[in-house]
Structures are given as C-alpha cells and as structure tokens.
Image: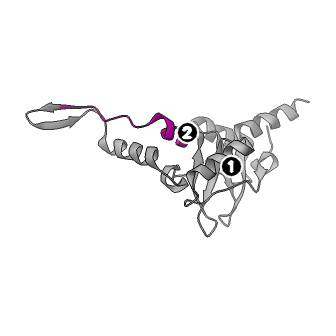
C-alpha cells in the first residue's frame, strides 16, 4: 500500500455550508449514497464534517443527565455540558448546528497507510484532503483505501 491519498481519494467532493438546512444535507447524503460531507465556510475553508453519526441525534433524542440530590445540592453523574451539546444536536436545523466542528484532515500527498492509521485511531470513516493552500481537494474514505488495496492484489 504505497499509494498516496491523492491516488485513491474522490476529487472535488460534494460539500455543504454551515447554514445549509439539515434536511438538504440529509437529502444529498441519501441521494448520493454517502455517509458524510465536508462543511466549508463562505471562503471555502474546511470548518467541519457532517456525518450519519451527527444525524443520529435527530432520531435518538436526548439522554437526560443523571444526577443525585444530596442536601439540596445536585451532583451530576455525567457532565451537564455534554447534555447541552446533545440538546443542540437533537434540535439543530442547520448543518452548522449538528456538524463535528473539529475536522480531522490529511494532505493529498500523505500515504494511504497514514490515512488508514488516522481513520483507525480516530474511529472515523472519511478524511478530507486539504492542499498546502488550505483548499479542499478531495475526500478519502475507508472504502477508497480498501479498493486501492484490492487493486494492488490483482
């Protein structure tokens, strides 16, 4: 597996903006049979990724924070800040409200081995490929890596 990300990635992937209505992003993902989309700001800079995982909040709803009441004090058994994040994602109406806003990305010149390592360690399915100027040039998925591996065995 000596190929680079550029050799196996999908160039010029479909993208959305933070203000894209959530329903529109869901329709794009369903119609194109993709599990996630890079999110670009007005200047074309990668600001997030929206994935099926982010959308699951819409269906699963909110898990209320567990707490105990001792001497008129609430002691949370889970971080209440996480509860606020869950409410935000469950009620969000735009991509920006539910996306993962700390996107992990890779250079198109990186090896597929490096892309596979990052995806495995971070438990993610896709990596946006960003060139030296900060421009999104493609996206590499686990499936792309597996296809590349398969082509090397033939």
CA distance for labels 2 and 1? 15 Å
Disc number for residue 53: 2
Camera sees residue 104: no
Which is nearer the eye, 12 or 61? 61
Camera sees residue 38: yes
- Is 59 inside the magenta-drawn segment? yes
Residue tagged 1: 28
- Is 45 inside the magenta-drawn segment? no
Q: Is residue 108 above or below residue 121?
A: below
Quarter holding the C terminus? top right
Give the extent of the magenta segment: 54-68
Q: Secondary structure at mark 2?
A: helix
Q: Residues within 10 Å of mark 2 (few under 14, many from 20)?
A: few
Residue drawn 72% across and 41% down? 33
Q: Residues within 10 Å of mark 1 (few under 14, many from 20)?
A: some
Residue drawn 58% across and 64% down? 41
Q: Secondary structure at mark 1?
A: helix
Which is nearer the eye, 86 or 106? 86
Image position, residue 56 (x, y; %): 53, 37
Marks 2/1 in contact by CB < 8 Å: the verdict is: no
| Residue 77 horizontal side relative to residue 102, left or right | left
* The furthest residue to the bottom: 43
Image position, residue 57 (x, y; %): 48, 39
Give the mark nearest the N terminus, 2 or 1.
Answer: 1
Disc number for residue 134: none
Residue drawn 45% across and 46% down? 89
Give residue 146's quadrant in the image: top right
| Residue 37 horizontal side relative to residue 88, left or right | right
Image position, residue 97 (x, y; %): 48, 53
Image position, residue 113 (x, y; %): 71, 39
């Amino acid at each position: 597996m000596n190929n680079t990300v550029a050799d196996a990635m999908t160039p010029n992937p479909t993208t959305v903006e933070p203000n894209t209505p959530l329903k529109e992003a869901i329709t794009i993902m369903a119609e194109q049979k993709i599990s996630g989309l890079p999110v670009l700001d007005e200047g074309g800079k990668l600001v997030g990724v929206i994935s099926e995982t982010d959308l699951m909040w819409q269906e699963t709803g909110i898990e209320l924070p567990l707490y105990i009441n001792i001497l008129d004090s609430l002691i949370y058994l889970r971080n209440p800040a996480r509860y606020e994040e869950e409410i935000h994602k469950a009620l969000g109406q735009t991509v920006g409200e539910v996306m993962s806003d700390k996107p992990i990305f890779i250079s198109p010149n990186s090896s597929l081995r490096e892309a596979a390592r990052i995806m495995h360690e971070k438990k993610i399915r896709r990596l946006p490929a960003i060139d030296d100027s900060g421009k999104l040039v493609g996206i590499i998925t686990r499936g792309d890596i597996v296809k590349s591996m398969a082509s090397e065995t033939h």
